[in-house]
Image: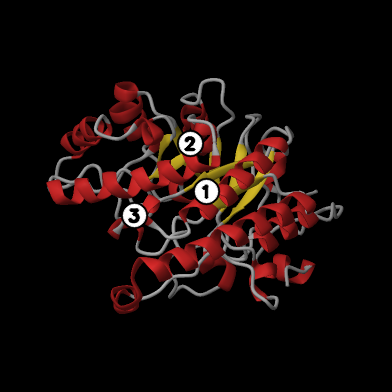
Amino acid sequence: MLSKQFLIKRKQCCGNGCLMCPYIPKHTKGSFKIMNRMGYACINMQLSKQKPRIYTGRSMIKRTFESKGIEYASELGLQNCKDLFEIIKWNKENGFDFFRITSNLFPWSSEYKLSDMPDYKEICKILSLVGDYVKQHDIRITCHPGPFNVLTSPHEHVVENCIKDLSIHGEVFDMMGLSRTPYNKINIHIGGVYGDKKSAMERFCTNFERLPESVKSRLTVENDDKASMYSVKDLYDGVFKVIGIPIVFDYHHHAFNTGDLSEQQALELATSTWGNIVPVVHYSESRQREQLDESIRPQAHSDYIIDYIDTYGNEVDIMVEAKAKELAVLKYKELHG
């Protein structure tokens, strides 16, 4: 799928060390320092296609929830947790020690307390086992709640819903016994600008203080992929300097919103906010370029990644946000070692 011919057609180095290569590999530009880890997000493509499927995305539409209630949500959540454990064990056996778990372990969790689920005790037991396993094997676990989590919103009901959703993520991480540090990050985009970026960031910082400690201690923020939104520089000046939470650098987003910083400058500014914890960065590439189709939004993520990921000598853990998930990481390692 990512053959030498495929790459050369796109005028990119195939990674095979060909003499007189006309396409200068990215890895000639920066440091050769090896990255600490490479991970993928939420879905294991191989396990999700086998029979029986192993996946953590069991859910239901609102009408079903209204009909079957918390009992069915609990049943689905329990199976999601069991399969989460299976995915993480597969990851360890196959060399993956960095994984982003889904934000949808428990369907419609905003409508009930987790402790009210009929299977709560068994769920707690399984998540505790997951936590023990990842700590024993030094597997880094993170999550990325959805874009509706908007702490910059001027509307109180939006902020309240955001606090509720983030609190559930913090509760789940506590159920696993994960560290209350950004090592086990809960990562979000800070939200809209609402016509005044400075005021919006001030609201974010104010609303941050309303979060429970299970979230505040783990929260990170990420740069956006639109020039009108938040660059790494914006987040550094308007969020990090005020409340001190780390910034996750997203390579692909930075290409559309540089904040007048080079890739290296933005990466190093973001990583400087992590203290003694290994920073996380996100990496993806343009689906438009991959598919050679200009009708696709350039911000859309590709299935695979083929460029060398230059960390400029910085030790980071890389979350690969490619649609082929673990297959994309495995293919990258074939190309670049």
Q: CA distance from mark 3 to mark 1?
A: 27 Å
Tell me if mark 3 has few (under 14), some (14-19) or many (20+) residues whose alpha carbon lies within 10 angstroms of its own.
Answer: few
Name the element at disc 2: loop
Where 86 sits versus 4, above or below? above
Quadrant where the N terminus is found in the figure: bottom right
Q: Is residue 266 above or below residue 114?
A: above
Q: Residue furthest right?
A: 19
Amino acid under disc 2 = Ser
x%, y% of residue 212? 32, 34
Residue 209 is drawn in which quadrant? Answer: top left
Residue drawn at x 38%, y 45% is 188
Q: Nearer the viewer, mark 3 or mark 1?
A: 1
Colour mode? secondary structure
Helix, strand or loop at label 1? It is helix
Where is mark 1, residue-wise? 124
Q: Nearer the viewer, mark 3 or mark 2?
A: 3
Could you tell me the amino acid type at mark 1? Cys
Q: Which mark is residue 147?
A: 3
Residue 320's spot in the image, x, y percent? 59, 52
- Is residue 133 visible to us here? yes
Q: Secondary structure at mark 3?
A: loop
How far apart are the two marked residues, 1 and 2, measured between alpha carbons? 45 Å
Dot 1 alpha-carbon crowd within 10 angstroms: few under 14, some 14 to 19, many 20 or more: some
What is the number of the mark on residue 262? 2
Q: Dot 2: within a 10 Å radius of its alpha carbon, few (fewer than 14), some, or many (20 or more) residues?
A: few
Residue depicted at 72% across the width and 66% down the height = 8
Upstream in sequence: badge 3 or badge 1: 1
Residue found 48% across the figure and 59% down from its top: 119
